[in-house]
Image (spheres, helix red, strand yellow):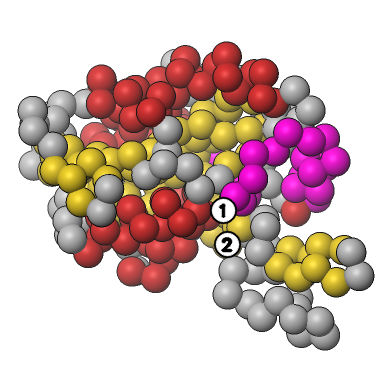
Amino acid sequence: MTTGILCATPEEFDALHHRLKFDKASLTLAGFEFWKGQVPNRSRPIVLAQSGIGKVNAATLATILFTTFGCDDLIFSGVAGALTDLEVGSVVLVTRGATHDYGLVSNGVFTCVADGDYPLPGVAKPLQNLSPVPAQVEQTMAHLRDRMADNLTIRLGSVLSGDVFINCQDARTRLQALGGDIVDMESSAVLEVARRFGKAAYIVRTISDGAGDDSHLSYAEMVATVAHNSALCVEDLLRIMP
């Protein structure tokens, strides 16, 4: 069993690379740098790489980890904006997710549609239910939550992803109405790639900002600090994953 670990930003990468053990030399492929390692006290190889920001980057890297490196599952670690009353530094283990910027614009109104559905007038069905992760993933995440509860503010929750940084209260309100607890720019792509390969993806996100009008201030100040909370969860997750 080989687990691929990916993240989007340098701060997220540094938090993971610092906490886990990897070979001294890396491998570069398609512009991504890959670091191979081993989970301590487990015969479980790991491969770490930084995707860069956005769904295209994340989907490309997830595909390479499955196809070229033969990964059996993925962990996506990093930060996210809160859509509910979650405080900065708290951790969300994702059990549901969807893309929030895929859909139809008609008469100046945007309608969010589920990934892959036809976003055409008269055909498009508004997104109503966020797709659940496989039952085994949710069970493992619940176990991780219970193990980490004494160390962190941690909960299960849902993620909405889109290729925009949310720095707007009106947008935040719209995403809340879709049922998201957190928002980021990559997770739904990782979940979709894993689904297509019939594999598991474990999404671990720590709150860096409130996804509102001042989110850019909180994010810039907190991203390096809170990324370590996600890395701490990843370290323990690797011990309990099936």
Instruction: Return the residue nearer the eye: 31 or 157.
Output: 31
Q: Is residue 228 above or below residue 166?
A: above
Front residue of this view, candidates 190 and 153? 190
Please report the residue visible at 8 percent of the width from the left and 33 percent of the height from the top: 25
Instruction: Tell me which residue sits at (48%, 42%) in the image.
Output: 53
Residue at 80 percent across and 68 percent down: it is 105
Labels 1 & 2 near each other (Cβ < 8 A)? yes
Q: Residue at x 41, y 57 (%)?
A: 59
Residue 122 in sight here: yes
Q: In the image, is 217 to the left or to the right of 92?
A: right
Q: Is residue 102 above or below residue 30?
A: below
- Quarter of the rendering containing residue 178: bottom right
Q: x and y percent of residue 108 in the render?
A: 89, 64
Q: Is residue 224 left or right of residue 85?
A: left
Amino acid under disc 1: Arg
Above or below for 132 versus 233: below
Q: Is residue 240 at least partly visible in the picture?
A: no
Q: Indicate the quadrant where residue 196 lies.
A: bottom left
Q: Does residue 158 show up magenta in the picture?
A: yes
Left or right, residue 122 beside residue 240: right
Taking the magenta stretch, the answer to whether it contains residue 109 is no
Q: Does dot 1 land on a helix, a strand or a loop?
A: strand
Q: Position of residue 111 (x, y in %)?
A: 79, 65
Circle 2 sits on which residue? 131
Looking at the rendered structure, the kind of residue marked 2 is Ser
In the drawing, what numbered circle is on residue 221? none
- The crowd level at tag 2 (other Cα within 10 Å; few <14, some 14-19, many 20+) is some
User: Where does the magenta region start and end?
Assistant: 155-177
Q: CA distance from mark 1 to mark 2?
A: 5 Å
Mark seen at residue 96: 1
Closer to the chain start, of discs 1 and 2, is 1
